[in-house]
């Protein structure tokens, strides 16, 4: 096995970043492969479960911060209702979630039955019916 030092890894990392660049959004490399980060060919290599979980934790923290900013009242919800709202924010993105005005108003007012009804009366529910049903149940039952 090759004797690899931390200095070698550091120098190689710097070199690869210099040569490859660091792209934070998916792009097609010159050879036509979907690439991300510092030369990661995601078509052939994908990502590891650990990398996916690291990305998920980052995304969850972003969603929580966005919910804190947009809906300060969300902190008063039960944990199940917070999970449903965070799942919606994660899945839809905040701009689309904010369009659920009646659902959100009912949720803020504590009218969970009508909030769940409004959630299910949406294109979102038509597109991801099982997920929407699970979120509606969390909202309704708390």
Image: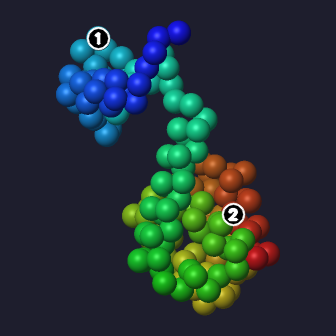
The earlier-in-sequence mark between 2 and 1 is: 1
Q: Quadrant of residue 109?
A: bottom right
Mark 2 or 1, which is nearer the eye?
1
Above-or-below relation of 135 to 1: below
> Foreground residue, 15 or 106?
15
How packed mark 2 is, by other alpha carbons closer than 10 Å (few <14, some 14-19, many 20 or more), is many
Q: Position of residue 93 (x, y in %)?
A: 45, 58
Above-or-below relation of 77 to 55: below
> Foreground residue, 50 or 56?
50
Residue at image coords 56%, 31%: 48
In the current view of this chain or complex, which residue is farthest to the right? 141
Q: Position of residue 89 (x, y in %)?
A: 51, 62
According to the image, label 1 marks what residue?
31
Residue 99 in the figure: left or right of residue 74? left
Instruction: Let me know if residue 118 appears in the view.
Output: no
According to the image, label 2 marks what residue?
135
Residue at image coords 61%, 35%: 49
Q: Quadrant of residue 77?
A: bottom right
In the current view of this chain or complex, which residue is farthest to the left? 18
Find residue 93 and name its label. none
In the current view of this chain or complex, which residue is farthest to the bottom? 109
> Foreground residue, 14 or 113?
14
Residue at image coords 58%, 75%: 103
Above-or-below relation of 87 to 53: below
Q: In the rendered image, which quarter contains the C terminus?
A: bottom right
Instruction: Let me know if residue 19 appears in the view.
Output: yes
Q: Position of residue 104 (x, y in %)?
A: 54, 78
């Amino acid at each position: 096995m090759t004797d690899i030092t931390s200095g070698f890894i550091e120098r190689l990392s710097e070199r690869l970043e210099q040569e490859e660049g660091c792209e934070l959004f998916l792009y097609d490399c010159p050879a036509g492969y979907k690439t991300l980060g510092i030369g990661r060919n995601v078509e052939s290599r994908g990502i590891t479960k650990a990398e996916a979980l690291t990305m998920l934790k980052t995304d969850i923290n972003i969603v929580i911060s966005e919910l804190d900013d947009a809906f300060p009242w969300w902190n008063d919800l039960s944990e199940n209702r917070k999970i449903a709202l965070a799942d919606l924010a994660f899945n839809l993105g905040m701009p689309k979630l904010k369009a659920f005005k009646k659902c959100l108003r009912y949720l803020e007012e504590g009218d969970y039955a009508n909030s769940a009804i409004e959630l299910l009366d949406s294109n979102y529910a038509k597109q991801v019916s099982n997920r929407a049903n699970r979120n509606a149940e969390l909202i309704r039952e708390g």
